[in-house]
Structures are given as C-alpha cells and as structure tokens.
Amino acid sequence: MVFFPLGPAGGMRPCPAKNILIYELDTLQCHPLVADGHELTRRSAPGVCGLNNTETSMAKEVRHKEVKAVVFDCDGVMFDTVKANTAYYDHILRHFGKPDMTSEQFAYTHMHTVDQALAFLFEDAAQLAQAREFRKQMSYLPFLQFMEIEPGLKPLLRHLKTRYHTAVATNRSDTMNRVLRSHGLEDAFDLVVTALDVANPKPHPDQLNKILDHFALTPDQMVFIGDSELDATAARAAGVAFVAYANPRLAADFHIEQLLQVEDILNGH
C-alpha cells in the first residue's frame, strides 16, 4: 500500500488507481519508535502529526518537479537490523558485566550513532571511555549474519540508477562500508554519507544538505526514505520530501510498505 496524507477526518480511503490507499492523517497521533522485548512496535504518544488537510505541499512539489536524487536511510530501510544491533550492543554490555539492553535502551541505540548509543548505555564516564575503546577493537563481521536485506531493495536500485542519483544518509559510522560490501552493494550508490562525514548526525539536516550540495540540487529535487522520527526531522529541516517506510505513524509526505512503491511516487501515481 502507498499512504498519502490527504484529508482532515483521519482514516483511510481507496484511490482508484493501482489499489493505492489514501491515508488521512490530520488527526492521527504520532507514535515514536519503541521496542518491547527487542521487537519494534509503535506506542501512542501525545501530539498530532500536523499534516495539511489536503495534500502536503512537499508532496505536491514531488508531483510537479523533476526529482533527481533518491536517498535511503540504512537501518530499518535498506536492512532489518534489529537482531544485528541487539547482538552488537549486548556483546559490549556483557563484556563489562552489564545486563542486556532494556527495550528503552534498544529503541535509542537503533536510531542513534554508536557514540551516542554508548553514552546512553554507559553513564559512568570512565567506563564509557573503556567501552568506546573496546568497540574500536571489535570486528563487526560476526554481526553481519544477523542483518536482513529488505525485499525489493536491489531491484529498486537497478531501476533507479538509470534515471536518478542514489545516496545513503545514515547514522552508522565506521561499519557502513563493511555492510555494503558484504551485501554486494558497494557500487550501488553514487554517494554514501555517514555520521563520520558531517558535524551533526540526524536529526540534524547535515547529511541531506551534504548530498544536495554534492549533486548541486535544490531540496525539491530530492526525496529521502526513512523509518524513524530522526529521519523525518532531518528531512523537514533540509526541506526535502520525506517517504516513511513501514511506519504509517510518522508525519511524512508519503507512506509506503514496500520499497518498490517508491517508483509509484516518482512516477506520480
């Protein structure tokens, strides 16, 4: 299904073309990412998404402007990394005699940079320094087996490469190149921007701004696909259209449940 934010009432109604569902989100509450038992779920939280009562202005821009670049978040979009991230951070915690992550800790580490995650997990400054040093000596290779590539990613990239610039904007740092190589994606993107490449990671717009500058584009010529509030916030700050993947509770210009549906958005369907 492709969800479009169209209408003041809240709810869903079908679109005549291609069995697309139009999702009326104006009065829908936003639900941040949390984890129960290390399984991603959505939980109600105060506040409304604040979408326009017709179609978002950014969605209209995508329909009427020529998009030239498609940008992907990594964790939760290109890959299901729940098991990998859980195993990775639990391994570090166990090394220092600490219990496995709680659901709150998992939710935070799943979206933030590794330095931010470790600071969240280790409150003691001396132990945090030790944990950071230990992490630098760790190989990410044992954890790659737990990463699951999202269905449709490789076919979508093959289709996009003939018409669009493709890029990655991720809060991963020194593990990203290994992830791409291990899944045969090292040549799949024109540009990869990690947390190491900018002064401020998401939710700041630095990564998306860097991509805009690299390709000499204006914000209305780029779309960003993400799955978390950090992604949505970065997209808003950069002024680019945001496509929420597998998370209909996020405020976004478009909502999709399968990556190949990105083509429907780009084709104006």
Image (cartoon, rainbow, N blue to C red):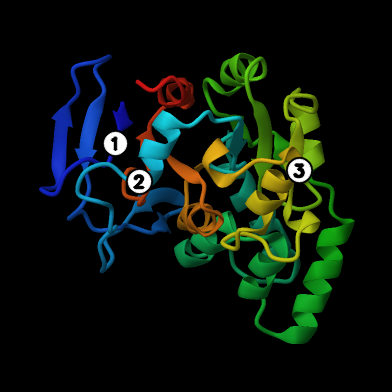
Label 2: how many Cα within 10 Å (few below 14, some 14–19, many 20+): few
Closer to us: mark 1 or mark 2?
Answer: 2
Residue 49 percent across, percent down from the top left: 29, 57
Q: Disc 3 to disc 2, how far (Cα)?
A: 25 Å
Closer to the camera, 43 or 20? 20
Report whether 37 appears left or right of 175.
left
Secondary structure under tag 3 reads helix
Q: Disc 1 to disc 2, how far (Cα)?
A: 12 Å
Secondary structure under tag 2 reads helix
- Residue annotated with mark 2: 57
- Residue annotated with mark 1: 4
Q: Residue furthest left?
A: 9
Label 3: how many Cα within 10 Å (few below 14, some 14–19, many 20+): few
- The quarter of the picture where the C terminus appears is top left
Closer to the camera, 134 or 76? 76
Residue 33 falls in which quadrant of the image? bottom left
Residue 167 falls in which quadrant of the image? top right
Residue positioned 14% across, 47% down in the render: 10
Residue positioned 78% across, 29% down in the render: 182
Report if the CB atoms under discs 3 and 2 are less than 8 Å apart: no
User: Which disc, if any, is residue 214?
Assistant: 3
Amino acid type indicated by mark 2: Ser
Amino acid type indicated by mark 1: Phe
Q: How many marks?
A: 3
Report whether 19 appears left or right of 97.
left
Please determine whether, in this image, residue 64 is positioned above or below residue 194. Answer: above
